[in-house]
Amino acid sequence: MKVLNESRTHWVPLFEKYSYVASMEHHTHHLKYTYPIYGGKRDDQNGIVYIGDGCWGVTNDPCPQSKRVDSDLFDSYDNDNSEHVWMMSGSNSQLSFRALDGDGNTRIQGNRPFRT
């Protein structure tokens, strides 16, 4: 918990200050992403989407619902051990992302508009 709290204390204010639209999170290797978050709360207009890292050839760490921090802020969270990889692309106006499983099927997809 100490690392999580320190990360939020030091990194999140910088992400918010510089208008990040998304950030990769690397902890349990689960397929996950949050609703847009700003100031610790859901904010669909100004929020940052936190996207979980991939799980390809790595066993993910168990993380039951009862141990998840701010689980109400997750739009999607799969606790299975499925392999996946994130594909991201950007245009002049938005960041697009999608998670693909081992068969190339899209598991999650979305986009966030860039802010000026």
Image (cartoon, rainbow, N blue to C red):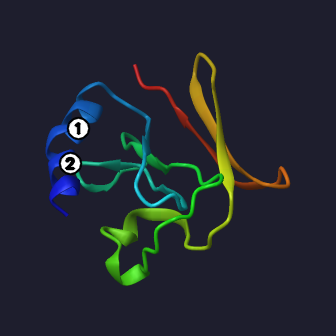
Residue denoted by label 1: 11
Identified by mark 2, the residue type is Arg
Identified by mark 1, the residue type is Trp
Look at the picture and state if 91 lies above or below 95: above
- Residue 109 percent coordinates (x, y): 67, 49
Left or right of 115 on screen, residue 95: right
Residue sitting at 43 percent across and 80 percent down? 64
Look at the picture and state if 88 lies above or below 62: above
- Residue 113 percent coordinates (x, y): 53, 31
Q: Classify mark 1: residues with Cα within 10 Å, few (<14), some (14-19) or many (20+).
A: few
| Whole-number angstrom distance, CA of label 1 to CA of label 2 | 6 Å
Secondary element type, mark 2: helix
Residue sitting at 68 percent across and 58 percent down? 83
Q: Quadrant of the N terminus?
A: bottom left
Q: Which mark is residue 8?
A: 2
Residue sitting at 51 percent across and 63 percent down? 75
The quarter of the displayed image where residue 34 is located:
bottom left
Look at the picture and state if 30 lies above or below 65: above
Left or right of 83 on screen, residue 52: left
Left or right of 112 on screen, residue 49: left
Q: Residue furthest right?
A: 103
